[in-house]
Image (cartoon, helix red, strand yellow):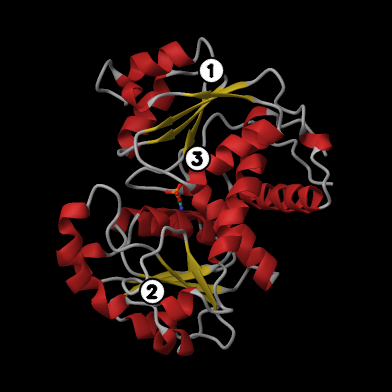
Amino acid sequence: MADTTLTRRKDFLSVLDFDAADLERCLELAAQLKSDRSLGRHAPTADILDGHHIAMLFDKPSLRTRTTFEIAIRELGGHLVALQADVALGRREPVGDVARNLERWVDAVIIRTFSQDVLQEFAAAARRLHVVNALTDQEHPCQAIADFLTLQERLGQLRGRTIAYVGDGNNVATSLAHAAAMLGVHVHVASPEPYQLPHAVVQQATSVARHGARLRLFSDAADAVAGADAIYTDTWTSMGQEQEAELRRGIFGPYQVNEELMSLAKPGALFMHCLPAHRGEEVTADVFESDASVVFDQAENRLHGQKALLMMLLAPAAGL
Ligand code: CP
């Protein structure tokens, strides 16, 4: 039985809003919820969020995050308020006003938007409202929960493992680095110079690192993947960067994850991607479709991880 009686957290804007104990318990709870669901046991969680209204506001497209949060809310017995995109933060009325309206009606808001600063401004304006980051340009913390649930399933003990992230030092890489550091996992990030993980993220990861976890930056992908238990990549052109796509294809070419790069990692190394993927760009079709690929496990685990997250934020005393 997972212990969900934790310090109640208001928001999950960043993996850094959790401490290591929160993160480990979130993974433990997610694994339990997944196991129960596979046995058809939805009932124990069906009324946990009864009476809770949860709004979702997405300023950017989404398949996985939107679908899995909607199912998570429904399976926990909560009530979804799907806000239309025309509410877009800061364009019709000040961000803080949107937050102060919503806190009069709903218990939590799940937001996908551009700026982490805007998300923080929103959360700070509404002291009673729980706010969840469903992706900003800077961080993607819900993805990191699913990623480490997947790694835990495949590798068992996480501590001391090494993940190589190859490509753009973006929001996904940032949240991966934060979570890895807390869980005692080493991360090697290989990126071309202007697209390295920001220095501030390296400092943050270093400050929360446990069990000797190290974050190392590389410019050469082959150096980064040596000895890695998993190779992770993401699109070279994130949402909002479409006008740079051609330039980025040229710059990131040497960072493609292909069979040759996979062969330089540990034998049996996993391939990871948050999706959507672009075959022939950041990953070859061969690697994407190979037995090493766990990308659809990651996608499935978005559901279980986010159910656990919602329980921890909104019903921390609930046990299963
Ligand atoms: N990985 C991820 O966040 O997918 P979506 O953009 O489809 O939500």
Residue at (36% x, 66% y) in the render = 278
Residue at (28% x, 17% y) in the render = 94
Q: Nearer the viewer, mark 1 or mark 3?
A: 3
On the image, the x and y values in percent for residue 161 come to 58, 74
On the image, the x and y values in percent for residue 191 come to 29, 71
Q: Nearer the viewer, mark 1 or mark 2?
A: 2
The crowding category of the residue bearing disc 1, from other C-alpha atoms within 10 Å (few below 14, some 14 to 19, many at least 20), is some
Residue at (66% x, 64% y) in the render = 152
| In this rendering, position of residue 164 left or right of residue 195 | right
The crowding category of the residue bearing disc 3, from other C-alpha atoms within 10 Å (few below 14, some 14 to 19, many at least 20), is many
What label does residue 204 carry, if any? none
Residue on which disc 1 sits? 128
Q: Amino acid at mark 2?
A: Val
SS at badge 1: loop
Q: Is residue 319 visible?
A: no
Nearest to N terminus: mark 2 or mark 3: 3
Residue on which disc 3 sits? 66
Position above or below: 4 against 234:
above
213 or 94, nearer to the observer: 94
SS at badge 2: loop
- Give the Cα separation between the discs numbered 1 and 2: 43 Å
- Give the Cα separation between the discs numbered 2 and 3: 24 Å
- Give the Cα separation between the discs numbered 1 and 3: 23 Å
Whether ligand 1 has any atom under 8 Å from the Cβ at mark 3 is answered as: yes
Residue at (41% x, 56% y) in the render = 172
Q: Amino acid at mark 1?
A: Arg
Dividing the picture into quarters, in which one does residue 5 lie? top right
What label does residue 283 carry, if any? 2
| In this rendering, position of residue 209 left or right of residue 123 | right
SS at badge 3: helix
Nearest to N terminus: mark 1 or mark 2: 1
Instruction: Work out which quarter of the rendered image holds the C terminus and state it.
Output: top right
